[in-house]
Amino acid sequence: MVTFTACRSKAELVVPARTTPREVKSLSDLDNQPGLRKYVSIIEFFRCRRVPGGDPATSLKAALAEALVHYYPIAGRLRELPGGKKLAVDCTAEGVVFVEAHADVRLEEFGEPLVPPYPCVDQFICDVGDVTAVIGMPLLYLQMTRLRCGGVILVLSMCHSIIDAFGMVQVLRCILDLARGQPLPAILPSWDRHLLTSPVAEAAAFDSSEPTAVAIPPAPLSLDELVTRSFLFGPRAIAALRSGIPTRLGRSATAFELVTAAVWRCRAAALEQGPGERVCVKFTANARGRWKRDRSLPPGFYGNALFITMAEATAGELSLTRAVELVREAKLRVMTDEHVRSVLDMMARGHREFRGTDLDQLDSTFMVSDITRCGDETLDLGWAERVGGGVPMAGEIMDRVISFYMTSKDANGVDCVVVPMCLPEPAMGRFASLISAATNVVARSSM
């Protein structure tokens, strides 16, 4: 694998191009989850089409300043409300961080297709310091790394308390739209956090009781033991999975259901879970366009809008058919109006049931976040075209073990679902063999 060091310029603070409203904006109950108080990143690769007109870093900074006029809360700072359990954005226009960097490496050296793990990925991500220290800090960091071939890598790191992956792509698209000379972003932003706020939130804000501390046992897995590989599921692989279940279910099963069911059961087998052991899959469902209520989330909503759902079974009963059925049932269960309201009420009262997965559950729990439809294929620099990207799959153990479904083209130019998998090395070999057998296709993996 290629190795290199990026040469970074001094970090610059970029403020909105014009005067913006000075106000305090409340976050939603989804935004206020304690587990979201950290920075997360997306990475995007661009291949040079032609020599850019002018300096790309200068035009990108100017576009970032203009984007902050539309997304002015992002130029502010988070502060804690009385009690410390809830956050708000103080729209101070203090600005965000921009870093220009150069790396003596060509885009082709990252492999084809561009899938995790990416070599030296930490060289492309801004150093934000403590990733969990978000109060009073810049809410956005953008690093632009120019490559020897003329290509560019953009990494956007943002505070998860105010945005999810879909929102991050929306913000980056706004910046790139403006950098290409468009007068306005294609999608205008919408705050509207009240749509995902429980009516009990105000009362809960004055509850000063602290949750009981729970001791978390040591993790059975460590970063040193884990390897990451990406598996591509194209039309042939998905068709093979579809043919392996009853015809009626196969006709209606989605690609997500088929891939998740197959990966879930192969992962459990690769980790040698006993027939009677409970295994589960946790995945996110997006409230954008799916939650049927009087007021749906507007197109420009960029806050957190992902709800967690779960399917569970014993490893012994996890046939492909049963796994597809369980994943489908979990999907249908999560996006009802009743369920969403109950989740928001629980979060407003300070319950932590939806914080994710504890470290001691990593063996038995497969975690998924599907971002194949977050819109990153619309990203365009004009003088450079997007050729891949998504989530870096880097950082702490919990940032690596979640399988973020992304999209990519295989060696033949066919659109595929990319499933990054992080497992101990012996289990990874077993997993690759099981997936290959399940799909009758050798899954292309990236070392």
Image: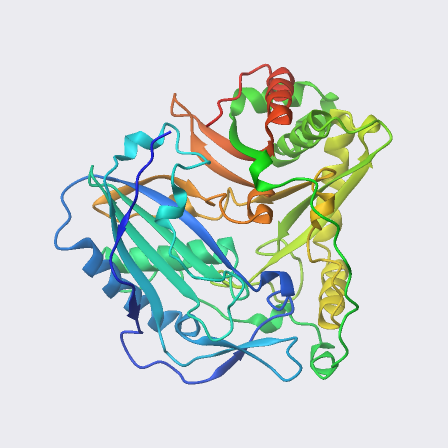
Confirm whether residue 181 shows in the render: no
- Residue 424: give x, y in percent of width and height: 62, 31
Q: Quadrant of residue 433?
A: top right
Instruction: Please state, as top left, top right, bottom left or bottom right, where the N terminus lies in the image.
Output: top left
- Horizontally, residue 60 falls left or right of residue 218, namely left
- Depicted 53 relative to depicted 326: above or below: below
Q: Quadrant of residue 410?
A: top left
Task: Point out the residue furthest to the right here.
Answer: 276
- Residue 374: give x, y in percent of width and height: 48, 48
Residue at 72%, 22% (x, y): give it. Answer: 245
- Horizontally, residue 95 falls left or right of residue 346, namely left
Confirm whether residue 301 shows in the render: yes
Residue at 24%, 41% (x, y): give it. Answer: 151
In terms of depth relative to the viewer, which is nearer, 219 or 340?
219
Residue at 72%, 84% (x, y): give it. Answer: 206
- Residue 128: give x, y in percent of width and height: 42, 61
- Residue 87: give x, y in percent of width and height: 58, 75
